[in-house]
Amino acid sequence: MRLSKSVAIAAALCLTASLAAPASAQNSIGRKQEEKKAEIPTCSQRIGSIAVREPDNKWWEGLGLESPEALIKLFVQRSGCFTLVDRGRGFELAQQERALAAGGALQGGSNIGGGQVRAADYILVPDIVSKNANSSGTNVGAFVGGLLGGGLGAAIGGSLSFNSSTADVILSVTNVRTSEQQAMAEGHGDKTDIGFGVGGGMGGWGGLGGAGVSSYQKTAIGQVVVLAYIDAYTKLVGQMGGLSTAAAQTAPQRTVTMSRPGVLRATPSEKAQVVRDLEPGMILYPTGNTDGVWREVTDEVDNKGWVPNGSLQMAC
């Protein structure tokens, strides 16, 4: 027996209410997002300077998302755990200004020149391990539309859908000076909710759309990836929290080369015993010890001695 249209409408409305409760569902999603935002760690002092580099595989393109670089930069800025240095488009434009300064085109007193660019202590790369954009997509609107017929089902169902989306991501940090992989953290994002669309998903992030990552705000999988990266970033900061805040000072000493012929002496004195002769271009390894104009070094076979600073230049 076929249901009358009025009975079908009532049944559909009851089904919709029992499945969705749209206002409460939206509130639930909003609460989850606010909770996640609150989880981003904050630091009382900065661990070091960091640059964000997108991976070469461009995984986000297959999901219809934008590069996660701007998203991770937003987390870094919000947390205050690192000094963010730009090595992207902003840096390219800064280099143009420097080229103008070098060519004498800028006004006097512009104070742009060599030795001003801050070094990155670390490079952070955001990658993804796996993603499931919609593992159980069920469009309630289509179901209701089929039950009712005509336009009423579309009006009620609209963008109402089940979304079971998951993402597993990874953040890796490389020490610029030593090339060591300083830290690596995995993050998981999961969202099983019923909602009317996802357009307002991350709207409370204060300019997220304007940061060049609007697709993370407007898509379900984008929101899940955001949650996964928050999880990973929180773990990453925890891993790096015990590191020295003076990365440049605690890193191994840079190598030096002989700029002219010289000798390696046993003590910091022109009268000291000669350990060996040194040729121009020879690479030496500073120990970190100094005495006036003298620097203690070792050679490639671990001979240790002293050389005047005037005979040395920094190796590239």
Image (tube, grey):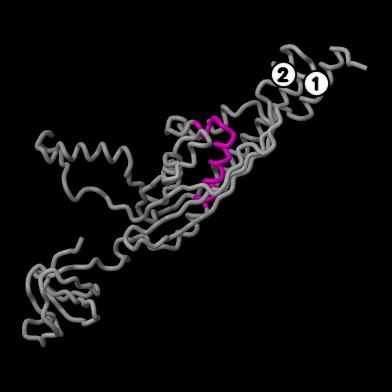
Q: Secondary structure at mark 1?
A: helix
Q: Secondary structure at mark 2?
A: helix
Please check the rendered image and state whether residue 224 is part of the magenta-colored stretch, yes or no: yes
- Disc 1: which residue: 12
Q: For the residue carrying disc 1, how many other residues have a C-alpha within 10 Å: few (<14), some (14-19), or many (20+)?
A: many
Q: Is residue 277 left or right of residue 242?
A: left
Q: Quadrant of residue 304?
A: bottom left
- Residue 223 or residue 169, whichever sits in front: 169
- Disc 2: which residue: 156
Residue located farthest toward the right when viewing the structure as drawn: 1
Please say if 265 is above or below 86: below
Please say if 316 is above or below 71: below
Please say if 78 is above or below 278: above
Q: Earlier in the sequence, mark 2 or mark 1?
A: 1
Identify the residue at horizontal 93%, vertical 17% (top origin): 1
Which amino acid type corresponds to the residue marked 2 in the rendered image? Answer: Ile
- Where residue 21 sits in the image (x, y, percent)? 73, 28
Report the magenta residues as a range.
215-234
Residue located farthest toward the bottom when viewing the structure as drawn: 273
Q: Are marks 2 and 1 in contact (CB under 8 Å)?
A: yes
